[in-house]
Amino acid sequence: MDQLLTRLDLRGATGELRGLLPAPKLAGDGPTAAVREILDAVRSGGDEALAELTRRFDGASPASLRVPPDELETARRQIPEDLLAALEEAGRAVRDFHEAELAAHPGFEHTGHHGVVTRELLLPVSRAGCYVPGGRAPLGSTVLMTAIPARVAGVWEVVVCSPPARTGPLSVGESGAARWSDGGPPRVAPVVLAAAAIAGVDEVYAVGGAQAIGALAYGTATIRPVDVIVGPGNSYVATAQRLVAQEGAVGVPSAFAGPSEVVVVADGTVPAEYAALDLVVQAEHGPDGLSWLVCWSEGVASAVEAAVERLAAESPRGREVTATLSQGGYSVLVDGPAQAMEVCNVVAPEHLELLTTDAASLVPLVRSAGAVFCGRWAPASVGDYLAGPSHVLPTARSARFSSALGTADFRKRVHVVSVDPGAALRVAPSVAAIARAEGLSAHARSVLLRASDLEARNQVVAQ
């Protein structure tokens, strides 16, 4: 078998590293064209198109798209007690973090030197859609990481879309995942429904893929459109979010929340198996993901590479891990910590792990990353579930300009401007001068008329 991690030797390289590092291979013309076709079908065909697309892509034929609300509480009671306790603990951690985030960024009031007073209102959107992947693994944690920040932000209605499992009656395994056999109605996995109950979700729909994004953006007879769509997905889901946002149909965060990524920086002071396992963690999510090892020792690189081979062979999801690492797994040799961080900043990973003797000393060198995990005891999986910040993070190098999902993604800044008579007189000349220079005479007149009336009133008072 070929080595899973492709080794890149950058030792001695000078100048710009961007051209020496492979870029993510995500949605090109093919996926974009396919997604456009799906979105057009949903916009024109509504529920009927959703039903056909769900049959085609998910192998399921739900009697109705919406999951009955009582099934959320039923799932909450059915899943194993330890799983329920873990979801509730994770929910508390996510809620506590986002409440603290919100409290740290209140609206403000500013009075300018001219006397104009401006207040900032932070207003939640009315309705938010959360996409929750469910094809290869039902991600109940993603419900918490998207719906709870929306709730904390004050969103009025929170909606979840998640793919249905294939047709068959429901049974719940020890892991809380759904098991199916032929003959029964399709449903959303119990762990997803239980998490939706914990997060206080208003509506859950058994629909996934790009068609779910289209339904949330355009609306159908069953699914009312939303104002904002959040949540990770494969390249088709992420591309659909970009396309509906470009149309102005809905808002999406600036981050591209696509296939999972990690960069692990290792110096040999942490066991090779730690680093290898954390590379495999991201590869478990499936195709198009990226797992990078960056180190400055051939011995460390070889030890981690060997451990990756062994762990991939042992993994219950070995097919996904092997496929992902063979396409997106890299082992990069550099001259030292400084060049290692240069590589990290070019890759701009979703998750950056610093498995080094003094991880904190490297943090000031970070310029682009979704989240940073410091030291041997902080794998990215802690951030996936219990750290508190959302695990919906920028991928495909969008960490260069965007951030983790947070309450700000569900709120709008509205500025309230107040002008008293004195300020109106002071600003009128400058406003009029700029307006005239731009050829906007009505703009100028709107302030000059008010100033003229104030001056006439002042003269009357003075008499």
Image (cartoon, grey):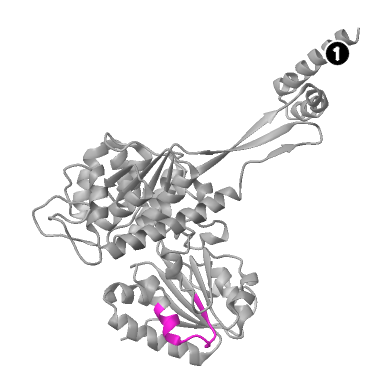
Question: Relative to 154, is 307 on the left or the right?
Answer: left
Q: Position of residue 281 (x, y in %)?
A: 38, 73
Q: How many marks?
A: 1
- Of 380 and 222, which appears nearest the observer? 380
Specify whether residue 59 is in view. yes
Disc 1 is placed on an element classified as helix
Q: Residue furthest bottom?
A: 299
Of residues 22 and 458, the one drawn nearer to the viewer in this rendering: 458
Side of 220 relative to 351 (left or right):
left
Res 27 visible: no
Residue 150 vertical placement versus 321 (above, below):
above
- How far across and how far down the image is residue 301, in percent? 48, 87
The residue under label 1 is 458
On the picture, is 86 further left or further right than 352? Answer: left
- Residue at 47% across / 46% down in the picture? 152
- Give the image location of residue 462, x and y in percent: 90, 10
* Residue 53 drawn above or below residue 19: above
174 versus 440 height, above or below: below
The vertical placement of 182 against 150, above or below, is below
Give the camera-side residue of 99 and 51: 99
Q: Residue at x 50, y 85 (%)?
A: 270
Q: Quadrant of the C terminus?
A: top right
Give how far across and how far down residue 350 sits, in percent: 48, 65
Taking depth in this image into account, of 86 and 322 the one nearest to the observer is 86
**Who's the residue at 43% across and 82% down the image?**
274
Q: Is residue 454 left or right of residue 91?
A: right
Question: Which residue type carries mark 1?
Answer: Asn
Q: Is residue 348 magenta?
A: no
The region drawn magenta spans 264-277
